[in-house]
């Protein structure tokens, strides 16, 4: 939050400077690299970074319209005069410029910096150290998992101010990157979490990756690491031999030699960590029992010990460690509200991020936005300034109402210029029956942990049965990018969002895709397209099965038909004429071997092509066909024949048009297996949702289907379970009832061991027949209780496995998950 004048910025970056109408003492407060994450445009400098898919330069005019007046670019925009009021600084490389700025900012830090790197656990270690130490020190840390070449400089910018300690994480994906991060972060203290396979594709060996990571600590005073893996311990020792960096290793008792040994004792869901320090035996307890959490906690503990920060108060703080929810959760709320939960962080950076997410998810400008906010934890700021700053952010984001919870925020109530209410505690609000206080608004719940906003969320959240489909929008984007990397630059991409986006949702998915600048969306029927338009989606949309009765509505909502026959053509032409539109885009489907919809008669096709080519009402935007067997090598010759047939037929259409016509043929498996058939566009479907035909692209399922156990039953020998008495019990069994059945889309073929679910680390079989609304599991050998989470599909039970058990294909499983299963979206 410290200001920088444009003059100073110019001299730090040493670029060519084009002055606008602003005074040169104009001050910058924010750095933005993403057009979505704009908080306060007027005082923002935008760095136009050229990423693999987005080029920041494309957004300059959009940002100018939003009020941004300062840009760092690698070339001035062509229509330079249109940005009369803006300042532009031209540099050779905008990423380098951003890093240069961060480096300058870093020079002014007067607190030591701790850096965390390693393959896993970086964010957890950083956040836990913050939680453990925040009462002792004023700490500034990088937001979420901002740890890349871009994330680190942005973090450094956001960490300015007074503090006792800074904590940053550093992540790399290829050689050469750590050198740059090390130059920016310049850590005094370091933690190396572990070395695993993550991002291994760009390194020739694990050793090479470790060597790269260790560069971060070359000038550090202290490095904490785990000594249990011999080669890591040896390589660290070798690298730092004869250097002044102090190495401090820890290990689990009974395995390796180390400076500090931890005795691990698991007790149910908790773990006791014992150790000797200064000749005295101590212990801490953490509320986790998985290996990753134990390792993360040991790293925190080792650093705290060697720094001399340990105390009995701190020891008890370990018991309160929470899982780090790095995601903002979006849920359906009561009374027509949407609910955004973000109650594990309460610093100002994360408030900014959450406000942006709220804006993105608010369905229309008419919907009210309410923010429920607890006292803020922000070390190093006088509270009057802090709350004034929060007020500014809320006003800027056009928040309609603030509900403040806590003593401090209440004390500063007079700084807030928007309608607001204050409560001294969460309980006080709960006592006021909060279910009557909210209707038809987008609510952001943002509070520090001790305010227990989860209790409030539980009331505001719409109650539906416990079975839900969790959709990760991040994974969706990763999958999209994995496929994009397979297609030639310039080839357009159409995304199939038909059938409720293969079961994963309509508007939320389309919004995410629109932001990713996909070229086309495809729906099955007009109604699906209308829903998207009503939600404000503006990407071109093609309707695959247009029905004559909906043509007028399609034109009104600018939906483009798939024209697959002369009849459809004639009817649509009439509708277009009576709507008096011109140059209306249509898409021509050709039959090449699938024998489904499409033109197969050459004469008909030529005639149509000529007719459209010569009139002004319609325009053939694209011509396409569908391949019958792209995922089966057995039929590759047939696929190639289809391609040849398509190219010939398409030419009959294309050659008769004045405008360029897009040709497209490939579905997901086709993109993977026949890159040479891409032409001007491809159509991505199942691959986006996480199923690939080959290992050429690595994708993950976007959806996780979960439920919770309703009840546990002991069933005696000789009894049976469920309808038809199919589940026979030979030995006494423990059975769990899960509230999901074939009415939810859980296939009845999963009955009697045909299907399995995952619970508490074990994969367990279905016992008896799947019922309409319930399924029973044999959990005899598993420790479970009512309320435990069950995964039906996700990272433990893979979608393709589920499909195989049911003797079907992933498409049917996904699209069969019924609408009553609530979809919940998350975005990191
Ligand atoms: C559904 C569909 C696709 C996408 O197929 P995937 O196998 O899911 O990639 C492509 N083209 C057409 C015409 C479709 O109907």
Image: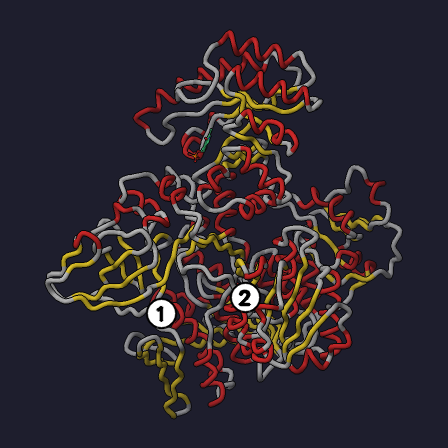
Location of the C terminus by quadrant is bottom right
> Looking at this view, is 182 or 241 the one in front?
182
At a point 58% along the width and 38% down the height, the residue shown is 518
In the displayed structure, 475 sits above or below 491; it is below
Q: Residue furthest bottom?
A: 280
At a point 31% along the width and 76% down the height, the residue shown is 268
Could you tell me which secondary element the residue under label 1 belongs to? Answer: loop
Q: Give percent across and percent down for residue 437.
A: 62, 68
Location of the N terminus by quadrant is bottom right
The disc placed on residue 290 is 1
Q: Give percent across and percent down for residue 198.
A: 43, 55
At a point 44% along the width and 16% down the height, the residue shown is 644
In the displayed structure, 345 sits above or below 743; it is below
> Looking at this view, is 518 or 816 the one in front?
816
Q: Is residue 221 visible?
A: no
In the displayed structure, 48 sits above or below 309; it is above
The alpha-carbon separation of the residues under discs 1 and 2 comes to 31 Å
Q: Is residue 808 visible?
A: yes
The disc placed on residue 460 is 2
> Looking at this view, is 242 or 714 the one in front?
714
Name the side, left or right, on which 30 lies relative to 515.
right
Q: Give percent across and percent down for residue 200.
A: 42, 52
Could you tell me which secondary element the residue under label 2 belongs to? Answer: helix
The disc placed on residue 27 is none
Report the image quarter containing ligand 1.
Answer: top left
Cβ–Cβ below 8 Å for labels 1 and 2?
Answer: no
Disc 1 crowd rating (10 Å Cα; few below 14, some 14-19, many 20+) is: few
In the displayed structure, 170 sits above or below 524; it is below
Question: Which dot, 1 or 2, sits closer to the camera?
Answer: 2
Residue 541 location, quadrant: top right
Disc 2 crowd rating (10 Å Cα; few below 14, some 14-19, many 20+) is: many
Q: Earlier in the sequence, mark 1 or mark 2?
A: 1
């Amino acid at each position: 939050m410290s200001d920088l004048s444009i003059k100073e910025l110019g001299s730090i970056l040493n670029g060519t400077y084009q002055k606008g109408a602003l005074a040169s003492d104009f001050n910058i407060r924010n750095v933005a690299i993403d057009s979505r994450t704009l908080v306060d445009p007027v005082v923002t400098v935008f760095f136009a970074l050229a990423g693999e898919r987005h080029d920041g330069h494309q957004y300059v005019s959009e940002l100018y319209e939003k009020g941004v007046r300062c840009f760092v670019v690698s070339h001035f925009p062509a229509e330079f005069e249109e940005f009369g009021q803006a300042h532009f600084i031209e540099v050779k490389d905008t990423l380098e410029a951003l890093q240069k700025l961060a480096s300058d900012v870093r020079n002014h830090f007067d607190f030591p910096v701790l850096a965390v790197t390693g393959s896993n656990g970086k964010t957890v270690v950083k956040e836990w150290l913050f939680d453990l130490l925040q009462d002792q020190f004023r700490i500034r840390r990088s937001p979420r998992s901002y740890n890349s070449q871009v994330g680190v400089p942005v973090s450094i910018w956001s960490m300015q101010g007074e503090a006792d300690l800074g904590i940053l994480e550093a992540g790399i994906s290829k050689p050469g990157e750590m050198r740059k991060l090390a130059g920016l972060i310049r850590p005094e203290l370091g933690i190396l979490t572990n070395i695993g396979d993550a991002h291994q594709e760009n390194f020739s060996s694990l050793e090479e990756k470790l060597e790269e990571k260790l560069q971060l600590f070359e000038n550090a005073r202290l490095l904490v690491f785990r000594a249990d893996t011999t080669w890591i311990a040896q390589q660290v020792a070798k690298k730092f031999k004869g250097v002044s960096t102090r190495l401090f290793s820890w290990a689990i008792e009974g395995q390796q030699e180390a400076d500090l040994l931890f005795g691990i004792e698991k007790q149910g869901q908790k773990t006791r960590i014992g150790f000797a320090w200064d000749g005295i035996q101590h212990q801490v307890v953490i509320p986790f029992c998985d290996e990753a959490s134990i390792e993360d906690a040991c790293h925190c503990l080792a650093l705290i010990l060697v720094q001399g920060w340990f105390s009995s108060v701190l020891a008890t703080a370990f018991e309160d460690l929470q899982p780090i929810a790095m995601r903002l959760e979006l849920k359906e709320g009561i009374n027509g509200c949407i609910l955004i939960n973000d109650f594990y962080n309460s610093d100002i950076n994360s408030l900014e991020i959450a406000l942006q997410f709220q804006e993105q998810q608010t369905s229309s400008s008419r919907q009210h936005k309410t923010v429920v906010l607890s006292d803020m934890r922000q070390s190093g700021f006088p509270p009057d300034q802090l709350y004034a700053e929060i007020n500014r952010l809320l006003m800027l984001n056009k928040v309609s109402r603030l509900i403040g919870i806590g003593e401090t925020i209440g004390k500063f109530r007079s700084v807030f210029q928007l309608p607001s209410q204050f409560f001294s505690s969460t309980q006080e609000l709960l006592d006021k029956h909060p279910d009557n206080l909210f209707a038809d608004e987008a609510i952001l719940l943002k509070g520090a942990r001790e305010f227990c906003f989860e209790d409030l969320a539980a009331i505001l959240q719409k109650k539906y049965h416990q079975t839900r489909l969790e959709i990760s929008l991040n994974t969706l984007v990763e999958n999209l990018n994995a496929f994009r990397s397979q297609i030639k630059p310039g080839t357009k991409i159409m995304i199939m969002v038909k059938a409720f986006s293969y079961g994963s949702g309509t508007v939320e998915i389309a919004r995410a895709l629109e932001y990713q600048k996909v070229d086309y969306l495809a729906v099955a029927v007009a109604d699906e397209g209308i829903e998207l338009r009503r939600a404000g989606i503006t990407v071109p949309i093609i309707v695959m099965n247009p029905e004559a009765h909906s043509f007028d509505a399609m034109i009104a909502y600018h939906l483009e038909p798939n024209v697959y026959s002369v009849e459809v053509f004639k009817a649509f032409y009439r509708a277009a004429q009576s709507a008096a539109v011109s140059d209306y885009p249509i898409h021509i489907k050709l039959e090449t071997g699938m024998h489904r919809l499409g033109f197969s008669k050459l004469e008909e096709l030529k005639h149509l092509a000529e007719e459209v080519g010569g009139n002004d009402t319609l325009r053939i935007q694209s011509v396409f066909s569908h391949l019958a067997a792209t995922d089966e090598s057995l039929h590759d010759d047939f696929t190639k024949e289809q391609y040849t047939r398509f190219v010939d037929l398409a030419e009959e259409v294309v050659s008769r048009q004045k405008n360029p016509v897009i040709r497209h043929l490939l579905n997901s498996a086709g993109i993977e297996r026949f890159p040479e058939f891409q032409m001007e566009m491809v159509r991505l479907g199942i691959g986006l949702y996480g199923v690939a035909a080959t290992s050429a692209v690595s994708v993950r399922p976007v959806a996780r289907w979960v439920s919770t156990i309703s009840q546990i039953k002991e069933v005696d020998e000789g009894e049976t379970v469920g309808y038809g008495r199919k589940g026979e019990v030979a030995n006494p069994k423990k059975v769990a009832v899960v509230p999901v059945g074939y009415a939810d889309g859980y296939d009845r073929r999963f009955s009697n061991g045909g299907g399995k679910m995952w619970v508490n680390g074990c994969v367990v079989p279905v016992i008896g027949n799947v019922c309409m609304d319930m399924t029973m599991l044999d959990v005899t050998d598993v420790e479970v209780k009512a309320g435990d989470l069950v995964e039906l599909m996700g990272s433990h039970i893979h979608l393709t496995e589920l499909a195989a058990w049911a003797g079907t294909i992933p498409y049917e499983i996904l699209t069969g998950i019924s609408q009553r299963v609530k979809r919940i979206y998350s975005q990191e």
